[in-house]
Image: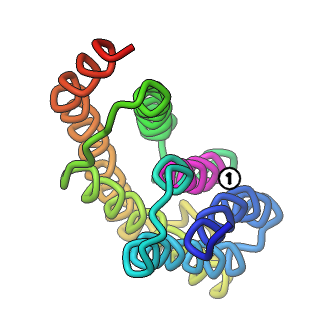
Amino acid sequence: MNWPNGLTVARMIMGPIVLVCLLAGSVRLAFYIFIVAMLTDLYDGYLARRWDRVTEFGKLMDPLADKVLVSMVLVGFLLMGLPFVSLWMVGVIIARELLILGWRTGLFKSGGGFATSWTAKWKTAAQMIWISASLFYLTVIHGLGLSPGDTSTQPFERALWGLGVVAVALTVISGAEYVVCNRNSESDARKTE
């Protein structure tokens, strides 16, 4: 296993660790681990291209690691009962990720390609910003002895809810874009089977 793939696997492992930290009340540690995980996301693809180490494993596992990380943190937020993270938000994001992951896996197995759109990159960025900002917020209020839902924290929580809505909107748009743009790839893959 090369370094880029190792970073991808490490990021996948960090998702459940962040979830455990959240449920144990260690929001500061969860925040730090999530930041490290985001950095691995930035560097694994860069290193793979720079060192000419792009592999089929990396192509499939890199987006899966992102999905595991995001899903684990969002489930943790739900279980914590955060007022700015709704069940419908998490449901839409996880459903879209599972749908696209299944489709991507099927195309790879049949030898087809899967085009990544700029909207999908913006979607990932929006999700990571929303989660990072939420974890930072939790770290700050925890340090101040406040709790989510307190009157003094509600303006910040409304802003975080807005970031979440943007992330969900980009999730839906990028999912629809994948369906439209990758139909040709699916058709070509079926012709070659």
Q: Is residue 14 left or right of residue 132?
A: right
Q: Is residue 162 above or below residue 113?
A: below
Res. 113 image quadrant: top left
Residue under the image location 36 percent in, 53 percent down: 164
Inspect this view and state whether residue 88 appears.
Answer: no
Which of the pair 131/112 is nearer the observer? 112
Task: Name the residue type under label 1.
Answer: Met
Q: Is residue 161 above or below residue 45?
A: above
Residue where numbered disc 1 is placed: 80
Mark 1 lies on a secondary structure that is helix
Magenta range: 62-77
Image quarter where the N terminus lies is bottom right
Q: Residue at x 66, y 52 (%)?
A: 76
Residue 34 appearing in the image: yes
Q: Residue 64 colored magenta?
A: yes
Count neighbours of disc 1 (C-alpha within 10 A) and say few if under 14, some if 14 to 19, many if 20 or more: some
Residue at the spot 47% in from the left edge and 64% down from the top edge: 131
